[in-house]
Structure formats: structure tokens, C-alpha cells
Amino acid sequence: MSLQQTLTIAVKEAIQSIYQAELAAVEFQATRKEFEGDITVVVFPMLRVVKGNPVQIGTQIGEYLVEQVAEVTAFNVVKGFLNLVITDRYYLDFFQGIQADTQFGFNAPEGKAVMVEYSSPNTNKPLHLGHIRNNLLGYAVAKIIEASGKNVYKTQIINDRGIHICKSMLSWQRFGNNETPESTGLKGDKLVGNYYVRFDKEYKAEVKELVAAGKTEDEAKKEAPILLEAQDMLRKWEAGDEEVVALWKTMNQWVYDGFAVTYKNLGVDFDSLYYESNTYLLGKDNIEEGLEKGVFFKKEDGSVWCDLTDEGLDEKLVLRSDGTAVYMTQDIGTAIQRIKDNPDVGGMIYTVGNEQDYHFKVLFLILKKLGYDWAENLYHLSYGMVDLPSGKMKSREGTVVDADDLIVEMATTAETLSKELGKLEGYSEEEKQELYKTIGLGALKYYILKVDPQKRILFNPEESVEFQGNTGPFIQYTYARIQSILRKAKELKVDTSVISLNELHEKEKELLKLLQEYPTTIQLAAKNHSPALIANYTYDLAKGFNSFFQNVTILGTDNEAEKAFRVALSGKVAQVIKSAFGLLGIDVPERM
């Protein structure tokens, strides 16, 4: 039983014994640094069931706990806060319980599985900075939910069809001279992306010519010959034209090969892939079923709608009058198909930018109305955009921050800073390059994941690679510092198998309290779909260790029991840092 559970029972018994009243719940918080104590009971909420002065109530509960609970040795009351001092023995017993547990904080899977969708790119351009945030968030949330005790499936839907794909194809046909990734040495996604940008350039030039010839801008935009040709290509693709389909397959494969390299470099993966070319006709049967159930209604022109006005939304089109699907139709069908493919899944998380908030509200509501019980467990992991100091990105104009370029730039930035700090004596060139990658990628991932998903980010590469403050490299450096201590302890043959300490230094106690928070933090991060909670917890733990390191002698103490405990405690902190960073998809170097 955890300390909070023990104290909850005891506080409820105290209220029953002293006031003959029933308390539904007990609220705890960490004791503020300026007061003595390890955990604080908040008295104010109790005033609903117990009338009286909060200081007096707190004092009476404190006296009861000191008498009845072995772990509580003393207390003090500040206004409506009861600060409890917990015995060193309790924390030492806790440590011995977790010392050898390599899965500390993680729960075994139980209940229904969860599917997490992320990435879901278009196949007409390479991945950019926005995709990086999406991938990092989705992957980290999947890992955190898995650690919290669920089987997780990671998936994406690849938007591999539509007019935007045909624009790249047509542009390559016109201007490509049969060039390929092999002949140009370019990654396939970059090559195809270049032709998407080229299409836009040609299209704008044609619009300009038409306007000069007397057309209005709206007419020119609709009548530009290159656009009409792309629309014709889309019709041919939908009709199964052999030549168009063959080109589509070839160019898409170039893109998939390019994406695979980026995903590998970014350290993310997927368990299954869905392709829009396979799913875009899904959902029509579900619309028929919904019409029969009265979930949808038909308008005079034959179009099908869902009336969501009672829910504070509007009427939503789910099938056009000509019987063609809209995105909503397809998303309804894909969600249902995914559960058919994975019957053990009881909920899904969609990692998609906040510009789609309304779309997902509507989608989830419609699936609930159609009567699917799993629709209660759908979540839109909505996130804000990533900006650079230079402004917003536009892929049509070729001004995006390319994901691959950014990954390389991060390693270069880490290299520059490492050389300035002069910390890499005795490393081979290969080891240095590997370390720069680890630091650069860790800096990028941490900078993005430490922010609440819903907030917009202004990404500053130089700031992210700092070795001080709330950054990935600071935490990585703390881990590497502990590894150095452990290597020296091994040379000194420090035996950490037996812990015979009875009293704790306050800095040791602070670290143990932080370690105790790890399992709860995982559960909270899973519940809130927020890697930021794990990131900032890891920063607090690294900060706590550095404070401990500066105030306590680890290997230099003459007391063997102290030495053994401090080395063991350092090792556990390192293990939890590595474990927590693993949930964020961040590697830690053994030395740096």
C-alpha cells in the first residue's frame, strides 16, 4: 500500500473518531520547501463535513496520525495545511523495494488495447517541422500509455491520393526528364516535393497570364490549363487508368522510401499503416446504416447530413448529392474498419493539429450516435503549431523547415557547442559524431515535448542545445555524470547489494520523494495524454540529483554504509532518467 493510501485511510479514521463524520476523499500535496515536512494534507476541503477552525482541525488530525501511523513522526500546521514528517525508515524501505526493479513505474498490460494514430502525411512532399511535433507527440503518448498498463498499436493513415498528389505527378511528367531518386541522388520524398513546388510556380504563372488576358482572378484560378490537366489526371486515376496508376505507384514508392529514412532518423515507428487510396470509399455503407437508424437525414437534393444542433454544433454533410464521399464519410469508415481489424482495441487517439478540433468533435459525436461503445474512448490529441523565429511555414512555396535538414542541423549545433565546452577528450571521431546526433536529437525532442501539446511552440535550435536549464542535454549530461560515478564505484568495488543505513541526509530524502512520484507521473501523463508531464518530471529529478551531488559526498565518504547507499541511489536515479527519456523516445549517452 502506498503512503498516500495509508494516510488516506488514517485521516478518514481520524475524522470519524474525532468528529463522527464521513470524509469522502483526502487531498494531498508536496510540502512547500520553507516548511518542515514531507507530505501535506489540505484541510480546507474537509470544512464541508467538519465545522471549525482549520488550524485546530489540522492539529487534532496531526496528533491522531502521530499516535496511530508508524510512518508519521511529527507534524506542523500552517493555516489550513497539515505538514507531516515521515520517518527515514519508510523511505529506506521504499528504496529497498524498488532497487532491483528494472520495470519500476511500469504496469503490466490489462483491459482493452489503445490505438494511437500519428504522422499521417501527404505523399506529395517531405516531412517538415510540423510533422516532427506530430510524430514525437504521437510516439511518446503511445509509449506512455503502454507503460501505464495498456497494449498499444501505433498507426498512421497515409494521404496517398487526391489532387495534390496529381499535381506532383503532372509536374514530374512535364518537367522531370525521367529523373529518379537514383539518377539525382535525392531522397524520393524531396524529389517529389520539388515537383509539387514547381507545379505551384507554373500554376501561378498561368493564372497571371490569364488575368493579363482579361479574366478575373477567380476565373483564372479555376481555368489555368495546368490545374485542369491535374484534375483530369485525378479522374483517370479514379477510373483506374493503367498509365496514371503506374506513375502514381512509382512516385509514391519514392516518397515511402524517403519517409522510412526520416522515421528511422527520428526514432519513431508504426505497427500498421492505412492508405487513403484503400479507405476513401469506406463509410458509405455506414451512412446507409445511419439513415436507417435515423442518425442521418436526406435533403431534397439527395445529400445526406447529420443534425448536431442539439449538441451545440451545426448540420454536417456526410455524403454529397452525387453520392460521393467527403472526408468525414471516410473517417467514419476508417475508424470502424480499424476496430474490425483489431477487435481488442477499445479506444483511439488521433494526433492531429488543432485546426481540426471541430472535425474531430463531429466525428466522435457521429460515431457515438451510430451506437459504437468504443466511441466513448476516442481522443483528439490536438496540438499547436511550431513556429521558428523567422515565421510560419508554407509547403507550396517551398519555405518549410525540412525534417531531415533540421535533424542534421541539430547535430551540427550540438557539435559546435560541445567543441566550445571542450568535453570530448579521448573520443574517436565516430564516437563524437554519434554523440552529436544523440545530443542534437535529444535537444530537439525534449524542447518540443516539454511543452503542453496544446500550446504553440517557438522553436529555437540554439536554446534547445544548452547544457544548463530545462533542456534535453542538461538531463543527458546528468545521466552521463551518474554513469561516471558508477564506473568509479565499480573500480572501488563498492557493494550496493546490502543497504544498512538508518538515517537519511535531507538531499537523499528529497531524491527518494522524487523517485516515489515516477509511477504516479506515468499514470497522470497517460490520463492527460501529455508527455510534458514526463519531461518536466525528468528535469526535476535531474535537478534534484545535481543538488544532491553538490551537497553530499558520494564516493569520498568514510562511512561504507553511506557510500553504498549513495551509489545505489545514484544508480536508481540514472535508471529512472533513462526509463523516462525512453518514454519520450530520447536516448541517453553513457558518457559525454
Image (cartoon, rainbow, N blue to C red):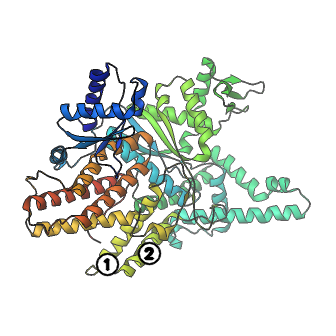
SS class of the residue under badge 2?
helix
Residue at 41% across / 39% down in the picture?
A: 527
Residue 33: percent from left, percent from top: 34, 52
User: Farthest residue in the right direction?
Assistant: 214
Measured as percent of width and height from the top left, residue 400 is found at 60, 64
| Residue position marked by numbered label 1 in the rendering | 423
- Quarter placement of the N terminus: top left
Q: Can residue 347 be seen?
A: yes
The residue type indicated by label 2 comes to Thr
List the residue tagged with mark 2.
412
Q: Pointer 2: residues within 10 angstroms few (<14), some, or many (20+)?
A: some
The residue located at (89%, 65%) in the rendering is 212
Query: Local crowd at mark 1 within 10 Å, few (<14), some, or many (≥20)?
Result: few
Residue type beneath disc 1: Lys
Q: Position of residue 273 (x, y in %)?
A: 46, 46
Which numbered disc flags the more N-terminal residue, 1 or 2? 2
User: Who is closer to the viewer here, 136 or 278?
Assistant: 136
The answer to whether 34 appears left or right of 495 in the picture is right
* Element type at mark 1: loop
Q: Quadrant of residue 522?
A: top left
- From this view, report whether residue 98 is shown above or below residue 297: below
Q: Is residue 52 above or below residue 202?
A: above
Is residue 305 found left or right of 124 in the rendered image? right
